[in-house]
Image: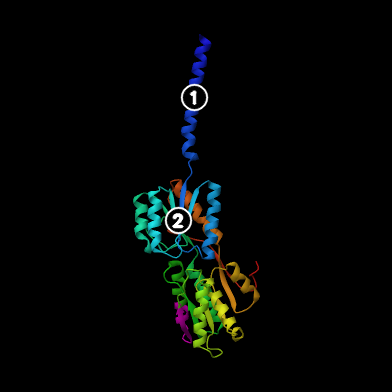
């Protein structure tokens, strides 16, 4: 009788312990769901920091859904609303937040935090992880001014629809305008649906055809590497690489680094730490999932100038 009673009590204790353990472990083992939404996955830089984000997410056991709207910014709104309805725990965007306010508001209404990954600052974002676009543009625009002796015609490739790139163009505008003997020959916004190289090449070919004289173009300043590479292709195809046209980009993607290392017209770019951006964005999400707040509306990740001397590093 006593033995039977003891076995019964022991069984109840063990069952209770198992239930308690399950209750304790349940939330800890629950897989956090995170959506990453961008219209710019065709861009190498975006690919790199999305991959870095995914690597950290894998370590943390998150379920990550990467959504590419293939250049369609407006579609980002409905994709945000979709994942809000699906009950994700956090959202990461790589798009101008001012253009997707309706989607961000739906996330706020559902108490779902949103982090910008090389996006733009906005009250509806918990934070934005990015590079210092003003500093990068100042570095490359100043490089151009110095290389051409503060005199000559410059072609600019910009993309004002995306804040991280828009502020680069604005800073370069300011620097070139401060030099009376520099003229901005053309300010071009290329089609980026395929990454931007092909359309940048076509548009640069048109500029070259309109300015056929040797020395009529002193430099090409590009707000990111794809237009710089497209301009380089156009200049080489036209046989005008010997004119000393200086080209600069921003991002230091592998193709651009390779061209800079050759010592040709593409002389400089700025290396963003794409892995650092993706990693820092993931760490920001981790803090938010843990119930923490992030004080800084912008988190800057360091950059560096890349020239022929350090392109191989």
Q: Is residue 17 magenta?
A: no
Q: What secondary structure is found at the residue carrying circle 1?
A: helix
Residue 17 location (% of width, % of height)? 49, 26
Q: What secondary structure is found at the residue carrying circle 2?
A: strand
Q: Within the image, what quadrant is residue 147 found in?
A: bottom right
Residue 151, visible in the rendered structure: no
Query: How many residues crowd mark 2 within 10 Å: few (<14), some (14–19), many (20+)?
Result: many
Q: Residue at x 51, y 65 (%)?
A: 43
Residue 262 location (% of width, % of height)? 65, 75
Question: Is the C-beta separation of discs 2 and 1 under 8 Å?
Answer: no
Q: Residue furthest top?
A: 1
Q: Which residues are magenta?
A: 173-187
Task: Residue 92: give its label.
Answer: 2
Where is 103 relative to 311, above or below? above
Query: How many residues crowd mark 1 within 10 Å: few (<14), some (14–19), many (20+)?
Result: few
Task: Residue 15: give its label.
Answer: 1
Q: Residue at x 56, y 59 (%)?
A: 275
Residue 59, visible in the rendered structure: yes
In front of the other: 161 or 248: 161
- Which quadrant would the C terminus be assigned to in this image? bottom right
Q: Residue at x 57, y 84 (%)?
A: 238
In the rendered structure, which disc, 2 or 1, sits on the residue that comes first in sequence?
1
């Amino acid at each position: 009788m006593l033995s039977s009673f003891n076995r019964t009590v022991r069984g109840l204790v063990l069952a209770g312990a198992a239930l308690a353990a399950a209750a304790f472990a349940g939330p800890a083992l629950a897989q956090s769901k995170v959506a990453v939404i961008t219209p710019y996955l065709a861009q190498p830089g975006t690919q790199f920091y999305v991959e870095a984000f995914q690597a950290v997410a894998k370590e943390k056991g998150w379920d990550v859904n990467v959504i590419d709207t293939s250049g369609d910014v407006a579609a980002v709104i409905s994709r945000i609303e979709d994942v809000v309805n699906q009950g994700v725990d956090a959202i990461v965007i790589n798009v101008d937040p001012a253009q997707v306010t309706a989607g961000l508001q739906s996330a706020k209404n559902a108490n779902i935090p949103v982090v910008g990954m090389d996006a733009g600052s906005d009250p509806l974002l918990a934070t934005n992880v990015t590079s210092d676009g003003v500093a990068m543009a100042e570095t490359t625009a100043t490089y151009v001014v110095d290389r051409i002796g503060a005199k000559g015609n410059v072609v600019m490739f910009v993309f004002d629809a995306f804040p991280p790139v828009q502020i680069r163009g604005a800073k370069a505008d300011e620097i070139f305008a401060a030099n009376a003997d520099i003229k901005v020959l053309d300010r071009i916004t290329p089609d980026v649906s395929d990454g931007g190289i092909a359309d940048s090449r076509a548009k640069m070919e048109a500029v070259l055809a309109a300015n056929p004289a040797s020395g009529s173009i002193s430099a090409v300043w590009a707000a990111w590497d794809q237009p710089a590479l497209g301009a380089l292709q156009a200049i080489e195809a036209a046989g005008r690489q010997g004119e000393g046209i200086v080209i600069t980009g921003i991002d230091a993607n592998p193709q651009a680094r390779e061209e800079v290392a050759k010592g040709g017209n593409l002389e400089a770019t700025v290396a963003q730490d794409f892995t650092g951006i993706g990693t820092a964005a993931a760490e920001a999400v981790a803090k938010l999932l843990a119930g923490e707040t992030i004080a800084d509306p912008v988190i800057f990740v360091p950059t560096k100038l890349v020239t022929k001397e350090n392109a191989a590093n």
